[in-house]
Image: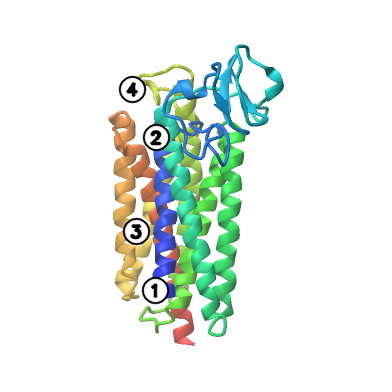
Amino acid sequence: MNFNKIAKTALILVYLVIVAGALVRMTGSGMGCPDWPKCFGYYIPPTNVKELTWSENRDFKKGQVIIKDEGLWVAKDNFTTGAEFDASHWEKYTKHDYALFNPTHTWVEYVNRLVGALAGLACFVMAIASFRLWKKDKKITLLSWFVVFLMGFQGWLGATVVYSVLNPVKITIHMVMALIIVAVILYIIQLVNPTQSTKVFNATFRNVLWFSLFLTLIQVVLGTQVRQFVDEQVKSGIGNETLWLSKPELSFYFHRTFSFVVFFVNLFLYLKNKKLNLGFGKINWVLFLIFAEVLSGIAMYYFHFPFGSQTLHLVIASILFGIQFYMILEARKSIQSTL
């Protein structure tokens, strides 16, 4: 299997992690596994609360978790329970005080972690395979191993998100890091395919393209803040979707208004590309994705979060970011081709 296919597979799997993460947010499953990297101390998580409940004459292994007295308790060693609860075999889980079990949430979060592990493995395979390209371009190998580091860092961030009981700042950093990983893999793919560019260089187009990418990143950050507000509404006991954004914070209005800025900046790029015949065909996809993003946002606000709309909204933004960054790489190659 050639390196290009390996890199593209890694990219697809990283995007699947983003999709899985969006599903976790949509279903409120972020604390489905209250520990990390295991889930309630198991490699394969429980499906019934009985598995997390103390009972006599039951075998426990070191690290397994139970819910008792509204808290999590971790087995200190391998043992079989007696007729009474023996606290000497248990220690209180102290990283947080979240002690609820919802089997659906648990398995949604567990699948998210499995996809993340698979993506990490694909990135590691890419890094190993990159040694074959060391003599051709050392940057490919160095960047491939940098991706492995970023994936490890991303895993650690995921753990801190759980330990913080879904701190909004850490969730935002976690999302931005995923986009950075996407960007680095795209750069690697571009380095592996050093074809002669057919794009025409235009300094204004390149600079505005960078600006548009920055705007997209800002929108993603603003979107995570709006999503956090919705999560807080749900946690406060508001179960009616029609009321989640009935009294939104300022961040919502800023996020909504900012979408017009994003659209008009990219419309400028579209018209510039068409007028000067620069050859950046992907700008058509950018406008389509922005239009789809706006529609999904309208659906969430006016039709009260139809199923899948939140996931779609985030995934579209992630794909948009990837396409815009790849266009920047194309612009970079067009600079080289005109020197």
Point 71% across, 21% down: residue: 88
| Cα distance between the residues tagged 3 and 2 | 25 Å
Q: Are marks 1 and 2 in contact (CB under 8 Å)?
A: no
Q: Earlier in the sequence, mark 4 or mark 1?
A: 1
Where's residue 49, x and y in %? 46, 22
Taking depth in this image into account, of 67 and 126 the one nearest to the observer is 67
* Residue 214 in view: no
Q: Earlier in the sequence, mark 1 or mark 3?
A: 1
* Residue 107 in view: yes
Return the residue at label 2. Answer: 26
Q: Earlier in the sequence, mark 3 or mark 2?
A: 2
Name which quarter of the figure residue 137 lies in. Answer: bottom right
Return the residue at label 4. Answer: 242
Q: Are marks 3 and 4 in contact (CB under 8 Å)?
A: no
Count of labels in the image: 4
Label at residue 1: 1
Label at residue 126: none
| Cα distance between the residues tagged 3 and 4 | 31 Å
Closest to the camera, between mark 4 and mark 2, is 2
Q: Amino acid at mark 1?
A: Met
Q: Amino acid at mark 3?
A: Val
Where's residue 336, x and y in %? 48, 83
Q: Are marks 3 and 2 in contact (CB under 8 Å)?
A: no
Label 1 sits on a secondary structure element that is: loop
